[in-house]
Amino acid sequence: MKKFYSFIILCMLSPLAIFAQNNFNDADFFKSIFGVEKLTIVKEFITVDAEKEADFWSIYKAYEVDRKNLREARITIISEYAEDYGNFTEDQLEDLCKRSIKQKKKNAKNIEKYFKKLKKAGGAKAAAQFLQVENYFLSLSQVAVYESVPFIGELDKVQ
């Protein structure tokens, strides 16, 4: 647990500029902040009984595949926002907002689906740890994006 707190402190002190790039990926993001792969952090944080480990981590790996697919759709929305910034029509803004809301719901449903599977495979504690660490990482990535992308109309005020 001591190492996990060190990761959190390191995270707070690390620059999140990697999200400003269009070609970022999970491995780059986690390595830039924590110095290690995400799975290394997750395995240190989540406690699973030895006899349940194989099933639990197999399900977790399936979650990661699904999460990365959802992440790609989220990146597409962010990229479109960045490309069209300042030139939005009302319809484009509404479409981006609706797609963003839909994407957040899909992500929440995915986490819920895997929480249930992981609870069955590894118990409530391990599933709760999964939920906690995934919500932490999701929040961290969202903050990085929000810090890298201007709010609608923000650059208009600078002129």
Image: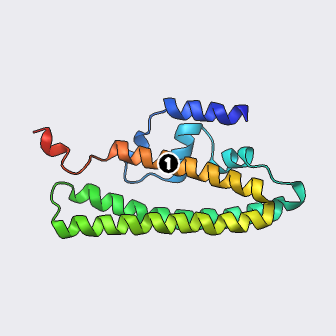
Q: Quadrant of the C terminus?
A: top left
Q: Residues within 10 Å of mark 1 (few under 14, many from 20)?
A: few
User: Left or right of 71: which side holds 4?
Assistant: right
Q: Amino acid at mark 1?
A: Ser
Q: Residue at x 36, y 46 (%)?
A: 146
Residue at x 47% of width, y 48% of height? 141
76 left or right of 126?
left
Tell me residue 135's x, y (percent): 57, 51
From the viewer's side, name the closer residue of 6 and 131. 131
Residue 62 image offset from top left, x and y in percent:
66, 67
Question: What colouring method underlies this structural image?
Answer: rainbow
- Quarter that holds the N terminus: top right
Q: Position of residue 120 (x, y in %)?
A: 78, 67
Give how far across and how far down residue 109 sits, in percent. 55, 68
Question: Is 21 situated left or right of 62 in this image?
Answer: left
Which residue is at 25% across, 58% downward? 83
Q: Is residue 54 above or below residue 148?
A: below
**Left or right: 142 with respect to 51?**
left
- Classify mark 1: helix, strand or loop: helix
The residue that label 1 is drawn on is 139
Furthest-left residue in this view = 159
Q: Residue at x 23, y 64 (%)?
A: 93
Q: Quadrant of residue 15?
A: top left
Q: In the rendered image, which quarter is residue 155 located in?
A: top left
The one of 24 and 156 positioned closer to us in this rendering: 156
